[in-house]
Amino acid sequence: MKKAIFILLAAFIAVSVNAQPFQKGTTAANVGIGLGTALGGLGKARPAIGVSVDHGFWDIGGPGVISLGGYVGNTGYKYTDAGYTAKWNYIVVGARGAYHYNGFTELSNLDVYGGVMLGYNIVKYTADGAGADLANSYGSGLGLSGFVGGRWLFTENVGAYAELGYGVSVLAVGVTFKF
């Protein structure tokens, strides 16, 4: 079984040598699950889920491309105690821009990037029972954040990604698709 997994992994890596770097005209979409969050809440957390899209718009004369794109993510918490239930729901929607370094000539299947996001955090808080009068104490708001990440393509169009920064989670990992 271990040999079969190793052979499949080696085949994916061998196929990935033909992948093209992120460049002008490239579109990449990430779908992932978040680990850790900067958003508040007590109790049991729902998994953070995020989706982002980047499209390469400008070559900047060096080994890199500037992309513009969007982000949507969701997470939430539920806290229950004797006669009291509180729920937090967070949706983050944002526009983002990033610099993709594509100077790794031997690693054309690697996309390393960093950027900024202007986002809007939509917060919904509800409570039942004692203390329910605090249900309007949480507000939505606009925010600016930064992120860094990387994509590793196993084939020309499918790979894995990891991204560190503010969204619905501090670290997101998942699948990436390149078009």
Image (spheres, rainbow, N blue to C red):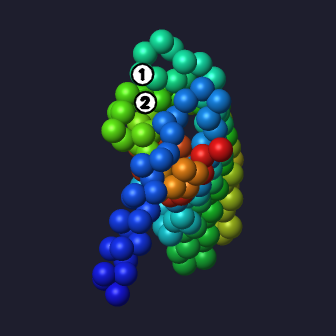
Q: Are marks 2 and 1 in contact (CB under 8 Å)?
A: yes
Where 71 falls versus 56 (above or below)? below
| Residue lying at 48% horizontally and 61% vertically, measured from the top left | 42
- Quarter of the figure that contains the C terminus: top right
Q: CA distance from mark 2 to mark 1?
A: 5 Å
Please tell me which residue lies in front, 69 or 88: 69
Residue furthest to the top in view is 61
Residue drawn at point x = 51 percent, y = 14 percent: 60
* 126 and 167: which is toward the camera: 167
Numbered disc 2: secondary structure? loop
Please tell me whether residue 138 is drawn above or below residue 112 in the rendered image.
Answer: below
Q: Residue 145, can we see it?
A: no
Identify which amino acid the numbered label 2 is placed on: Asn
Q: Around disc 1, counting alpha carbons within 10 Å, would you say few (fewer than 14), some (14 to 19), or many (20 or more)?
A: few
Does the rendering let one see residue 80?
yes
Secondary structure type for disc 1: loop
Position in image of residue 26 (x %, y %): 62, 35
Disc 1 residue type (three-letter): Pro
x then y, percent, for residue 149: 43, 41
Pointer 2 residue: 102
Residue corresponding to mark 1: 63
